[in-house]
Image (tube, rainbow, N blue to C red):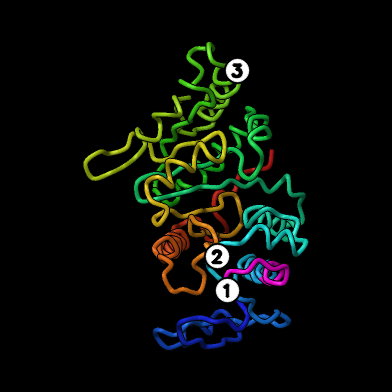
C-alpha cells in the first residue's frame, strides 16, 4: 500500500521499499509512507488535501511500475471531485496514468492510446471511449478509434487467453441500425473498422445489436459464451451489463499502458467509509487478476500496447 499514516483496521507495518513487503508478518498491512502527505482527513469527507495526496500516491506507484520495481499496480477508487478540488486535471486513474506513461516514454499522450476493460468471471467488455459526455462519445465512434480499440484488445488478451480473443463488436444504434433504418454508423463506420481489423488478424465480429450481444458473450457453466470480449461503443453501453452481473465481481483494467493496472469496479462509497462494512470482493478480484496478468508470458513490459496511429 502506497499511502500516508492511516486509520486502518489492520495493524500497519511501515516499509521503506516495495520489496520489503515480503518481510511483513501475516495479517499485517505493509505501508510505504510518502513524505509530505497531510494527516488523514475525516472519514467520508471530500477534501482537496485528500485528492492531492491520493494523486501523489498513484503517481509514485506508477513511476515505480514504469521503473520495473513492482509487477503491477492495483488502484483503490479515487474521488473525482476531490481530485478536481486539488487541481488535478484528470477525470480519473486512466487518464492520469496515460499521461504519466507518455511522459515516461517521452512521447505525446496521443501516442499512448489506452482503453478501459471491465471484466467479471462471466463477461469482459472494452470501451471505445471512456469519461466523456454522451455527445462526445458519439463523435468518438470513428473507424480509426474502433480499429485502434480492436487492436489494443487483441494484443492485450492474447497473452492472457493463450490465443487471439474472439471479439464481438456492439452496434451504436437500436438493432445495430437495422440495415440503415435507424442510423448508418454500423454500415459506414463500424463494419469497415471490423473488416480492417480482420485483415490484420484480429478475430472481430459484428456489429451486433447492443441489447443482445452481451447475453451472447456471457460465459456461465451452463451457457458457454459465443465471444470472449465485447467491444462497446461508449461507457454506459459497456458498464451497465457488467455492473448488473455484480459490481462486487467486476475489475477495471487499463489496456495500452506499459504497466499492468487493475482496480475494483466500484467507487469510493464515502457513505460507508470507516464503518468496516465494505465488501472487499472486487478488490480481491483485482489483485488476483493483476497477479495472473503479471505471470502471463509477454506481459512483463506492459499490457495490451498498440502501435500509435
What residue is drawn where x is 54% and y is 12%? Answer: 180
Q: Is residue 306 above or below residue 188?
A: below
Picture quadrant of residue 149: top right
Q: What is the C-alpha distance between the residues marked 3 and 1?
A: 51 Å
Q: Which residue is mark 2?
A: 270
Disc 1 is placed on an element classified as: loop
Q: Nearer the viewer, residue 294 or 217?
A: 217
Q: Which mark is residue 43?
A: 1
On whether residue 52 falls in the magenta region, the answer is: yes
Disc 2 is placed on an element classified as: helix
Q: Nearer the viewer, residue 240 or 277?
A: 277
Earlier sequence position, callout 3 versus callout 1: 1
Query: Residue 126: x percent and y percent?
Result: 51, 42
What's drawn in magenta, residue-wise? 43-53
- Do callouts 1 and 2 mark residues in contact (Cβ within 8 Å)? yes
Q: Which residue is mark 3?
A: 188
Side of 241 relative to 184 (left or right): left
Earlier sequence position, callout 1 versus callout 2: 1
Location of the C terminus (image quadrant): top right
Amino acid at each position: 500500500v502506497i499511502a500516508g499514516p492511516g486509520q486502518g483496521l489492520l495493524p500497519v507495518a511501515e516499509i521503506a521499499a516495495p520489496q520489503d513487503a515480503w518481510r511483513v508478518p501475516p495479517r499485517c498491512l505493509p505501508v510505504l509512507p510518502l513524505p509530505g502527505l497531510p494527516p488523514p482527513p475525516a472519514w467520508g469527507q471530500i477534501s482537496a488535501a485528500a485528492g492531492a495526496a491520493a494523486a501523489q500516491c498513484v503517481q509514485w506507484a506508477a513511476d515505480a511500475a514504469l521503473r520495473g520495481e513492482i509487477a503491477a499496480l492495483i488502484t483503490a477508487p479515487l474521488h473525482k471531485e476531490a481530485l478536481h478540488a486539488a487541481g488535478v486535471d484528470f477525470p480519473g486513474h486512466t487518464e492520469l496514468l496515460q499521461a504519466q506513461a507518455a511522459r515516461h516514454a517521452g512521447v505525446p499522450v496521443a501516442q499512448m492510446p489506452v482503453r478501459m476493460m471491465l471484466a467479471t468471471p462471466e463477461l469482459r467488455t472494452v470501451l471505445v471511449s471512456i469519461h466523456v459526455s454522451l455527445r462526445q462519445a458519439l463523435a468518438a465512434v470513428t473507424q480509426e478509434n474502433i480499429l485502434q480499440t480492436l487492436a489494443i484488445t487483441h494484443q492485450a488478451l492474447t497473452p492472457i487467453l493463450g490465443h487471439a480473443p474472439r471479439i464481438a463488436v456492439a452496434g451504436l444504434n437500436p438493432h445495430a441500425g437495422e440495415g440503415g433504418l435507424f442510423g448508418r454508423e454500423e454500415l459506414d463506420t463500424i463494419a469497415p473498422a471490423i473488416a480492417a481489423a480482420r485483415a490484420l488478424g484480429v478475430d472481430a465480429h459484428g456489429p451486433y445489436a447492443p441489447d443482445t450481444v452481451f447475453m451472447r458473450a456471457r460465459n456461465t457453466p451452463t451457457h458457454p459464451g459465443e465471444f470472449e470480449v465485447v467491444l462497446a461503443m461508449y461507457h454506459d453501453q459497456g458498464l451497465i451489463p457488467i455492473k448488473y452481473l455484480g459490481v462486487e465481481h467486476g475489475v477495471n483494467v487499463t489496456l495500452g499502458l506499459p504497466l499492468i493496472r487493475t482496480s475494483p469496479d466500484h467507487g469510493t462509497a464515502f457513505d460507508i467509509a470507516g464503518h468496516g462494512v465494505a465488501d472487499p470482493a472486487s478488490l480481491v478480484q483485482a489483485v488476483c487478476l493483476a497477479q495472473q496478468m503479471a505471470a502471463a508470458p509477454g506481459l512483463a513490459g506492459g499490457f495490451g500496447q498498440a502501435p500509435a496511429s
